[in-house]
Amino acid sequence: MKARSISRGKASGEVLVSSEPIGFLGGIDPETGNVMEKGHELEGKNISGKILVFPNGKGSTVGSYVMLQLAKNKKAPAAIVNVSAEPIIAVGAIISGIPMVDQPEDISKLKNGQKAEVDGTAGTINLIS
């Protein structure tokens, strides 16, 4: 499916979907990749190596640096798909080398546990059988 390119690169992995925005500062443990935001639908799940699908980011601009720390710790998501990218997540993906797209044609096709490939350079998402 077509999407808008945000951060270059290509990655594949298991899809992890959240219908809620994600705040990386205080919401994701940069040492483990675990979601630690209390009450978040992904609380306790790990984002490492996943195709992380969520509407948009929230919170502090420091979230971009938490994403960079995740990448340095090899705990970052493999790729990010947003409904609508905002600067904190876009900058975080770019400085961390995480492929990212937004505005996918039909985000409802992406389900937890599926395998997918995100090409941030071409602006595409492909489901892998």
Image (tube, rainbow, N blue to C red):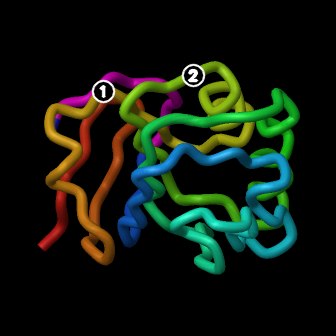
Q: In the rendered image, which quarter is residue 97 located in? A: top right
Identify residue for label 1. 103
The quadrant the C terminus occupies is bottom left
Identify residue for label 2. 86
**Rendered location of residue 100, percent (x, y):** 47, 37
Q: Is residue 115 above or below residue 102?
A: below
Amino acid type for the residue under numbered disc 1: Gln
**Rendered location of residue 4, percent (x, y):** 33, 23
Furthest-front residue in view?
39
Is 46 left, or right, of 55 in this rendering?
A: right
Magenta stretch in the rendered image: 2-9
| Residue at the (25%, 45%) spot, across then down | 125
N-terminal of the two: label 1 or label 2? 2
| Residue at the (25%, 37%) spot, across then down | 124
Q: In the rendered image, which quarter is residue 111 located in? A: bottom left
| Residue at the (42%, 26%) spot, across then down | 84
Is 91 left, or right, of 72 in this rendering?
A: left
User: SS for tag 2?
Assistant: loop
Q: Looking at the image, how many numbered discs can be counted on the residues?
A: 2
Q: In the rendered image, which quarter is residue 75 located in? A: bottom right
